[in-house]
Amino acid sequence: MKNFFFGFFIASLALISFQNSAQAVDINNGGNIFTANCSACHAGGNNVIMIEKTLKKDALSDNQMNSVKAITYQVTNGKNAMPAFGGRLAESDIEDVANFVLSKSEEGWD
């Protein structure tokens, strides 16, 4: 019985150690994805379709889009004139873009 528990314990540790840890955010990748997929409408944090809905800090806050979760949802599913990118980009790329947008909004898109 002692050997059974020891074997179970070792197997449990092995399973835990091989699980994927949360992926780190890659702001540089987010910038590359943004340039390739978003900048045609959102260059410099602007919005060429709906000029009042920019990616600037105040506008993101006013539109309740000032979180990674909100931006990720919008990029994944689209809304109004914005197409959905969920079928085109990996979840990790979308998360990187969301973090890039928030980072740039904090910096003033300089």
Image (spheres, grey):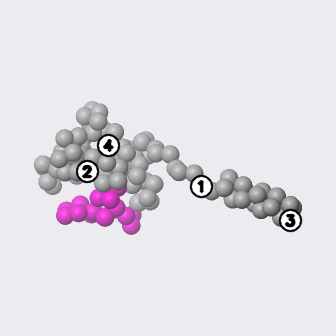
At label 2, the amino acid type is Met
- Residue ID for mark 4: 102
- Closer to viewer: mark 1 or mark 3: 3
The span from disc 2 to disc 3 (Cα, nearest Å) is 56 Å
Could you classify mark 2 by the number of other residues whose Cα lies within 10 Å: few (under 14), some (14-19), or many (20 or more)? many
Residue 74 covered by magenta stretch: yes
Mark-to-mark CA distance, 4 and 3: 55 Å
Residue, disc 1: 20
User: Mark 4 or mark 1, which has the lower sequence index?
Assistant: 1
Q: Which residue is mark 3?
A: 1
Q: Amino acid at mark 1?
A: Asn
Residue type at numbered disc 3:
Met
Residue at screen point 53% across, 51% down: 22
Residue 78, how many percent across, how many down?
27, 63
Viewer-closest of 47 and 68: 68
Seen at 68% across and 53% down, the residue is 17
Residue underneath mark 2:
65
Assign a secondary structure to mark 3.
Answer: loop
Q: CA distance from mark 4 to mark 1?
A: 26 Å
**Range of the magenta residues?**
72-88
Placement of the N terminus among the 4 image quadrants: bottom right
Nearest-to-viewer mark from 2 and 3: 3
